[in-house]
Image: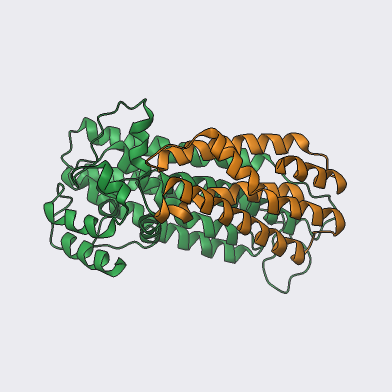
Amino acid sequence: SSGINAEYGLLLSGKIHFGYIYGVALIGAASMYTLLNLMSVNGVSASITVSVLGYCMLPMCLLAAVAALLSLNGLFGIMLSIVTVSWAAFASSKLFVSVLAMYDQQPLVAYPCALMYGIFAVLTVF
Amino acid sequence: NLSETLSSGINAEYGQPGLSTFQPDKQEDTKITLESDNLLEEEDSQSQPATTAAFWSFQFYQQYFNVNDQMVLERLMYACIPTPNSNYLEKLKPLPDFYGPLWVCITLIFSTAISGNMADFFASLGKDTDWEYDFKKVSIAGTVVFSYVTVIPALLSGYLWWRKSTAEIKLADTLSLYGYCLTLFIPISLLLCINYEWVRWLLILALVGTSGGVLTLTVWKVLSQEPKQLALIITCVLAALHVALILLFKMYFFTSTSTKTTPSDNSTTPT
């Protein structure tokens, strides 16, 4: 549902790239699922991965909403995107780490999340 | 913790003629660094992780992702500094990992594509042509990076296996080595979008020195048991391939048809 909200936000700001969002979301979720199963002792189910990634998409929805109202070109847009992506990556990695008890690997989980949300941000802002 | 490992790692290597087989005192080092409970659970001894799973099963690849963030950070940092005395592979044993190389490659692909496009953008600032994002750069960067990081380590470890070298280097070790050696490419590729030609060549030189240095020194140590001439030839070939990769990056992604040669040069000049 957060993904759908992100799309409405984009639609409002005039960018209609729905296909990209679905594609990135699907590939991102599949990659995180694979990576987390490789890195953790217990496995993780696909539904948990998709839920966590989807919930932490919420900051990206905010970003898309802001993009609809203001123009995000320029320094302010870039800073806001960086903050939003970091927030989303931090939150999702925290959730993954506590679910899977991978406490000393949090930065390692956060980085792929940050890449994925970064791609979403690029789709949103540019 | 880090300095402990550093000093014990360098002391352990000092005075040893070439690469030795896995030694008991090294286990102490790895025990200190490995804080994760994962690792002590999964391997019952601190020797090389011997999973009996077949290579087409998931468990086989799981052993290569058993790293914590401190290990990854340490491996990344050491890949940036060529040290004549130690062998980078010592940092990777007994646990070569694929996490670092995988994300270094993926990040490198993105950073090169983004930076290459920014370089084109800067170059087009003086002209009237419209600038478009070139998505082909991503796919080309991806192909080049991934094939370099898989094919060359495969050739190297295949050669060592064929020669029945006692250096105990497996494919996973060489893959990790090559992956981590590309670490410095990432910040350099981001800096390469700066539009001054002399800056770019300076960055290239730095990259050749550090990344090439780490790779060459490690390969040289790895081949220490081969006849000297053969080892020299192979090391030179691998070093040349590395330099070729770096130059390829520069030529394809970061040569624009108009770059400023001096800071005060406002008009565009063809190179």
Chain in orange, by letter, is A
Considering the image in quadrants, where does the C terminus of chain B appear? bottom right
Q: Decide which of A33, A101 is in the foreground and name it.
A: A101
Asked whether, in this view, residue B19 is left or right of residue A23, the answer is left
Residue A62 position, x and y percent, is: 75, 54
Residue A36 position, x and y percent, is: 46, 41
Total count of labels: 0
Name the residue: 47% across, 61% down.
Answer: B205
Q: Which residue lies furthest to the front in this view?
A: A99
Name the residue: 18% across, 53% down.
Answer: B27
Asked whether, in this view, residue B183 is left or right of residue B64, the answer is right
Considering the image in quadrants, where does the N terminus of chain B appear? bottom left
Residue B195 position, x and y percent, is: 67, 62
Residue B175 is at least partly visible in this image: no
Look at chain B in the picture and name its colour: green
Q: Decide which of B197, B213 is in the foreground and name it.
A: B213
Name the residue: 17% across, 52% down.
Answer: B18
